[in-house]
Amino acid sequence: MKKQLYGSMLGVIALSAGLSVNATEPPLADQKLLYSTPVREGITNLYWGDLHLHSQLSADAFILQTRLTKDQAFMFARGQTVEADNGMPARLRRPLDFLAVTDHAEYLGIYAQLEANDPRLKEWKMGMEWQDMMKQGDMMGLALAFSDAIQTSESEYLTPDSLRKSIWAEASAVADKYNEPGLFTAFVGYEWTSMITGDNLHRVVIYKDGADLASQQTPFSAQHSNDPEDLWDALADYEKQTGGEVLAIAHNGNVSNGRMFSPNRENGLPLDASYARKRARWEPVYETTQIKGDGEAHPFLSPTDEFANFETWDEGNITLGTPKEPHMLQYEYSRSALREGLRHEANLGVNPFKFGLIGSTDSHTGMATTYEDNFFGKFAHDEPSVDRTEKRMADQLQKIWQLVSSGLAAVWAEENTRESLFRAIKRREVYATSGTRIQLRFFGGWEFTQTDVMQADFASIGYRKGVPMGGDLNGHSDSGAPSFMVAASRDADGANLDRIQIIKGWLDANGETQEQIYDVALSDGRSANWLGKIAPVGNTVDIASASYSNSIGDPELTAVWTDPDFDPEQRAFYYARVIQIPTPRWTAYDRKYFGAVIDPRAPDIIQDRAYSSPIWYTP
């Protein structure tokens, strides 16, 4: 019945959602032109991807009905058609350039093996107990058992070593199967899932290496330790033992209840220089936007920022077991963490929170879908249906209408290979979007002129005369104020741009952190009035038809901006934020195409955006 229902809707949903349905699928060899980008000497290319996706190998995804495999996740990202768990054939409008399938290290692949009646489980008492529960259809019991076991190191709860090694070798080999240097990059990766008392400390782990090296050590899980310092030690050991390279990416500080960027370590001691060096070394970027809320800023922390309240999740921690308190917020959001980093650097000599910004999905469907008109949710039961918005995530957490169709990682790299992309991530030449493909360049320097950004080779000028996003400016007292060159263009299939802003954070003479937002490029010829206020760009959204018009806004915006409030003695960071014009949110598409009844609290309109990695100034 389910397939019949969805099959009858394909003519509406698959096309309106920006997906296509093909009766025949071209072989991979015939699809190479979809991904190939020529390497240009001395310049970087823009690559789009998702570094945080789950398949049926993740225990929570499997329990909540996801059956798409890791193979299918890579196939979908490359542009092939897969059948979603709700029965819909689905294909990306535009393929991704890279993907990491980062299934949870805790019980990696075990639930799929239980269903397959894998004989390797027979020597594991708990595995056999779980298999009996699965045969009885007791998925709620399995979910509770998983929740109880995921954070414990007691031996009876641990997957036998031989089984873990075997499953990890198989899982990491899948990435090698789909990795084609220069055409599509498939990263080996996993997720370390620490959540102390429900406070999120999750990290995804990304390898530069293939399965030959990555499979030599099994993933470090929260059952080994839920302290990130132990994870970093494990990553250091991996590099020492194998000669490979690896990094970690934290996410969802917004549901950490103040733990993610806390001034204290998990052992209760304050941050010290050793901690700061390790964190900066192993975590060069932070996932600032994804399905479980946007994490750039919060209106409580930035009350004068009219765009701060964007897809905000601030009810409590990841389990909603502990309500949020205001004092937690400053240690949860990327902008406030960047500010805290300046303060720590002044005290410790090292900035522990010197990170670039990326987005990714954290989808547990095996499908990286981020456009508002093709959002497939977090778990299989969140996939498009007439009643999905009335459900709750994992059947007990936030309502599905609160999920965010976000996000993407944009990487400026020399070529589409593991090595080149990995280097770019480590040097933080990356940016985040909430799912749209806004193109964004951001450079800082001391010699930019107003005409530089208008040149055809402005990126070459940016590299020659300054540093790109993620870089460092080291100034002198007689250098004058730094200038920043920024250029943004709309998603080719998306909405026009409202504005470009530069957000500055700094450490003042009293050791307090401050922030200021500067509107440096405005569409439609707008400018600030005598009070400094800027008129909204307008709104063309027709909610009933889930449509909008690009009759407002600009397709491209550029600026060369010099900091008018620069103090050469103050540490500072700068990053660019690009805002689109209003468009229909995914909930509006559900209302239009399903006739779904949407919670009145759910927004119907969104202004998608991009966040560059910062550029830091150090006296």
Image: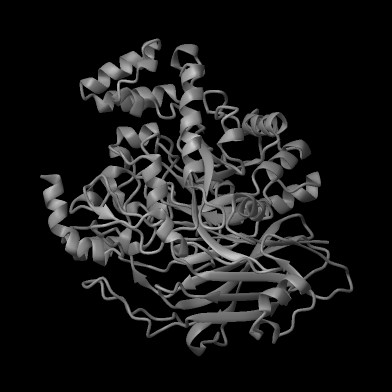
Q: Quadrant of the N terminus?
A: top left
- Of residues 486 and 461, the one drawn nearer to the viewer in this rendering: 461
Residue at (69, 70) in percent of width and height:
443
Instruction: Work out which quarter of the rendered image holds the C terminus and state it.
Output: bottom right
Tell me where residue 463 appears, x and y as whole percent: 73, 70
In the image shown, does 248 or 590 lie closer to the viewer?
A: 248
Above or below 463: residue 25: above
Above-or-below relation of 479 to 598: below
- Left or right of 64: which side holds 416? right
> Which residue lies at the image location 44% right of the left edge and 65% below the top edge?
436
Q: Is residue 199 visible?
A: no
Identify whether 168 is placed above or below 447.
Answer: above
For this rendering, which residue is in front, 18 or 306? 18
Left of 327 or right of it: where is 539? left
- Percent position of residue 531, x then y: 56, 83
Q: Position of residue 139 (x, y in %)?
A: 26, 27
Of all residues, the one furthest to the bottom in this rendering is: 525
Q: Is residue 214 visible?
A: yes
Q: Is residue 401 left or right of residue 174?
A: left
Instruction: Name the residue: 31% across, 56% down.
Output: 25
The residue located at (57%, 70%) in the rendering is 440
Relative to 91, is 228 above or below? above
Give percent across and percent down for residue 427. 69, 55
